[in-house]
Image (cartoon, rainbow, N blue to C red):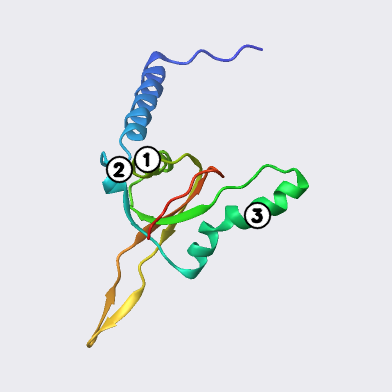
Amino acid sequence: MRARPRPKRYLRKLAARAQQREVILDRVGPELRPHQVILRPIVTEKSTHHSTRSERVSARRHAENAKPVGSSYTFEVALHATKTQIKTAVQELFGVRVEKVCTQQHMGKQRRYRFRMGQLSHWKKAIVRLHHEDKIEFF
């Protein structure tokens, strides 16, 4: 049994929708430079622990003949930054090889200012895993 042929008007409508999707996917956010993508490093006890990971894990994995794991560094990034933009920005700014990027969206908390409730701004966090031979020195 053959399918009923589609009218030309409907085919034009489908083509217009596909073209709109391509336009929307191209412009997700503003064009950002590397120093605009990465705002600041997040230096906490947990992020410092992850940044020294390759030194601790490599000895154990070397005994198991497993692939070494690189260190992870945490950054606050622009809200509109994508994973590929974050990866290229870290590689350009610090001259390292990036293996993986994980991102998290953080909603701003409500805070009390005098007699009113205020809202802290939303922000985005990126956890960047480097190649096991590379390292970033912040201090």
Q: Which mark is residue 132?
A: none
Q: Amino acid at mark 2?
A: Pro
Cβ atoms at labels 3 and 2 below 8 Å apart: no
The residue indicated by pointer 3 is 57
Farthest residue toward the bottom? 115
Q: Amino acid at mark 3?
A: Val
Task: Answer yes or no: is residue 91 visible.
Answer: yes
Q: Is residue 41 above or below residue 4?
A: below
Q: Is residue 67 left or right of residue 98?
A: right
The residue indicated by pointer 1 is 85
State the residue in front, 96 or 2. 96
Q: Is residue 65 left or right of residue 33?
A: right
Disc 1, SS: helix
Query: For the point 35% across and 42% down, which residue is it?
Result: 89
Report how far apart the C-alphas of labels 3 and 2 lie in the structure: 30 Å
Which label sits in the foreground, 1 or 2? 2
